[in-house]
Image (cartoon, rainbow, N blue to C red):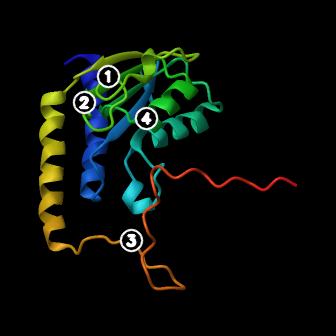
Amino acid sequence: MTQDEQYMQLAIAEAAKAAAEGEIPVGAVVVRRGEVVAAAHNRREGGKNALAHAECLAIQEACRIRGGWRLWDCDLYVTMEPCPMCAGAIINSRIRRVVYGVSDAKAGCCGSVTDLFSLPFNHRPEVTAGVCAEEITPLVQDFFAKLREELKTRPRWRKPADAETGSRAPKPETNQAAPQEEAL
């Protein structure tokens, strides 16, 4: 087993925790010079927080432990290709290297939907893809298969009614010009 595979096993263990909590099974581990600095898994649903992705939580913890926001000598191992938000956090924290397992065709920003790391930002991490993908793929597929079955029994989400009128807000016109402020 390679060193990348060993660290990815830790990220997979975090992803399993996420799945057990009803979260999308993504786990992340931050490693510095061969030592695990931080590990986390998705907590978006449980925490009711759109920012609680595994990568962001692991980066936040690594910054806290290291006492600074620059993680230039750290590597991030994550089970799924980072989304735009997480790719931004990786760039801003100066993560040296990103190692991920499976691609994300809907939101992946290391080459699937776009490649934010190829843009002319002030930092571009090295990327290694596909590590332990054969082990991660069934974890993700099983999670979404169970979720689809569960969703069949749940009522569909509807936009809440306006508290004053009781009606649903109309969709905004797509070609409508923005209102202009009056000149003083």
Q: Earlier in the sequence, mark 3 or mark 4?
A: 4
> Residue 122 location in percent, x, y?
59, 16
Q: Earlier in the sequence, mark 2 or mark 4?
A: 4
> Residue 21 location in percent, x, y?
29, 59
Density class for disc 3 (Cα within 10 Å; few <14, some 14-19, many ≥20) is: few
Q: Which residue is labeled 2 in the image?
A: 103
Instruction: Assess whether mark 1 and mark 2 are in contact (beta carbons under 8 angstroms).
Output: yes
Q: Earlier in the sequence, mark 3 or mark 1?
A: 1
> Residue 132 location in percent, x, y?
19, 27
**Whether residue 37 can be seen here:** no
Q: Which residue is labeled 3 in the image?
A: 159
Q: Residue furthest right?
A: 184
Say what amino acid the circle numbered 1 marks: Gly
Residue at 52% across, 17% down: 73
Q: Which residue is labeled 1 in the image?
A: 111
Task: Report how far apart the C-alphas of labels 4 and 1 lie in the structure.
Answer: 11 Å
